[in-house]
Amino acid sequence: MKRIFTNARLILPNAEQPQSGRLVADGDRIAVADDGTDDQAGETIDCKDRLLAPGIVDLGVFAIDKPAFHYGGITRAALMPDQAPVLDLPAIIRHQAVEGKPDLWSHPIAAATKGLDGKQLAEIGLMKRSGAKAVATGRQWIADSGLMLKLMQYCRSLDLPLIVHSEDAGLTAGAVATNGETATRLGLTSATAAAEAVSIARDIALVRETGAHVHFRQVTTRDGLDLIRAAKSENLPVTCGITPAHLLLSDIAINDFRTFTRLSPPLRSEENRLACIAAVKDGTIDVIASGHDPRGAEDKRLPYAEAAPGMAGAETLLALSLTLVRDGTISIGRLFELLSTNPAKILAVDAGLLRPGYQADFILVDEDSPWQVDARKMAAAAGNTPFDGLPVQGRVTTIYKGGRAF
Amino acid sequence: MTSKKTASSQSFPAGSDAFPHRHLLGIAGLHPWEILFLIEEAKQWVDLNKKSSKHANKLDGLTVINAFFENSTRTLLSFEIAGKRMGADVVNMHAAQSSIKKGETLIDTAVTLNAMKADAIVIRHGSSGAVQLIADKVDCPVLNAGDGSHEHPTQALLDALTIQRRKGEISGLTVTICGDVMHSRVARSNIYCLTTLGAKVRVCAPPSLLPAALDRFNVEVFTNFDEALAGSDVVMMLRLQNERMNGDFIPSPREYHYLYGLTRERLKLADKDALVMHPGPMNRGVEIDSDVADDPAQSAITEQVEMGVAVRMACLDILTRKSRAVEGWS
């Protein structure tokens, strides 16, 4: 059955600004998305001039947290392998791939090594057959360059992207913050931000060798971004992402030992934060993701160094990212490339774009609607947001997965 | 008000304006007059502690809990004596015997201590920020007796009192702090305290034990001890933890002694009347030589211990004034 969404402002492929028009969904697929008005037979839904954008594809979450994803307009989430048990076996991948259906599709990411121990290759080929769309090193870096080379060769032959965490563990051992005035004042063990560039430099050298597609999940420093920029100008198959926290907060936010600001990689200096904004603007950064990692009091109400890293980011992802549009850093069309189109492209799924034939995954957004982030009232499994109390604008009013409203 | 003059306590505003803080968690953020007020108030207890009967009854009936989550002998003893001399009932809680080892969270422990209706809690913990975490959960004043590499405020106060007694005015003195600055809460609290009071502070450490961004702390940074010592009025040595001596941060104790040990010969580079200090316990022959440490003319190390009790008595007194309804402190 066809459903016609009229009176919408559509975020169409390659368009910077929304286009007034309609979207026709035929079953779970998009049939038409354009500025036309001609009638088609079917149920008509008036979008009341709301923004109609592709559903967000959240690349690299640490928990499947449906209420938070619904609130945040996330229709697909790629789940990091750092689970209990680790996503390192075909059966576990197969089980996880149907978790959340029908209203949320989760794309399990295969662990690169058994148990994510960084020592032995996991059964990546079999996990691909079971539904894995990507491979990841998890929260940690693989120190063994020989293993990393084999991993990239393997991913290349299987045509899977490899998602990596970029921090040289030799430099960051024990550290919970970035070197700087704030960490020194607080007496927190900290590490040089160069840990990121060191690890990216090695991995780019191996990409040059293997031709594997490597996605650097979070790049948060000027030097790291410079390396990615240079690699892209060489046409190497590299992409990179970031979270709103690293775009909007610097290490000053860890003052007062607020453990909700304990992230991995840690918050960086203001200089690096501004370099990240510049990299979003010039297109070096391909993906903005939530890094959603809800953590309860047992993980967070602890002394800073003992608290677990991670933030609940799914609900605030869109609203915080919209500040980049309001500040004039990027257009709204570009924002949904970062939130939806590019992550879908990396995962090679036919979503993230309002294009005929693609999955009818989209959201209606009231981009000016004001609300306040409140850690105690979040839909997420836990409210560990570093943005607690922040007034923001923009919320999702309806979420459509496969043409159905949820 | 500036730190130029060391005023007597009579010249401070009466009542809680002189120290309007509920807890003593650190020196950072304190005004110079607040630091001077604490030091001034300690002086009366220095005199009392020299008498044969060392008892004041100001804290009669109050309960002070010393909650030490990290092993300590001298600081715990100092706080215990301070509390007892002020007349309080002092209870010591050692982490080794506590439920922390059984997996109870710090917050649960804090709530438990609070339910026992302590009138002041003195806390030492191995993790930076842990004392603040507890302070946020309890109804009584909290004294930080050292948290991780963050702060050790009473140590800085007793050091300032010692310097004042031996050298007079702190403002204008050149103080060199040398050792494992990266992991030292004593160094941080002393940097805040001494720079706030107008001293010129030099910081010296091996590059592997120097924290980042020290240039933002209003201090001069050195890695060459001889250069740092030149003309110093006070030389404050820090303890080097045993576990950091064997290759992780420095190659060996003897190399450390060669580069950063305070020897009689090296001390000649400092002012001829330079004061030598150490928060203890000392590694004799590593960061400091015995003949320097034990020279009563230049070393203030035992006097630091003596001042420690007086400073802690003053802190317990001042922080409980509100609950004791002392006039002007309600």
Image (spheres, coloured by chain):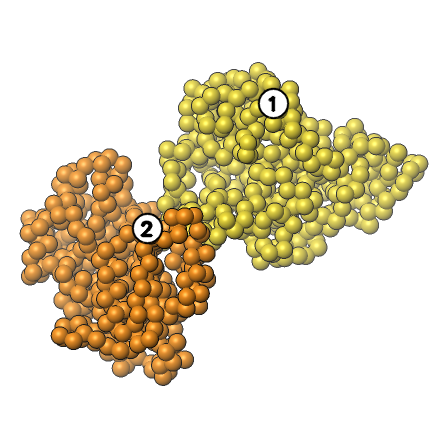
Chain colours: A yellow, B orange
Viewer-proximal residue, B78 or B179?
A: B78
Asked which quadrant contains residue B86, the reply is: bottom left
Q: Is residue B227 left or right of residue A247?
A: left
Per the image, label 2 sits on a secondary structure element best described as helix
Q: Could you tell me the amino acid type at mark 2?
A: Ala
In this view, which residue lies farthest toward the bottom?
A: B327
Per the image, label 1 sits on a secondary structure element best described as helix
Q: Check residue A90 in the rendering and tell me which mark sits there, or answer none.
A: 1
Q: Is residue B295 left or right of residue B247?
A: left
Residue A300 placement (x, y as % from top left): 49, 49
Viewer-proximal residue, A281 or B297?
A: B297
Do residues under tags 2 and 1 come within 8 Å of each other at their CB atoms? no
- Residue bearing the label numbered 2: B96
Where's the N terminus of chain A, which quadrant?
Answer: top right
Is A301 placed above or below B243 here? below
In this view, which residue lies farthest toward the top?
A: A157
Q: Could you tell me the amino acid type at mark 1?
A: Pro
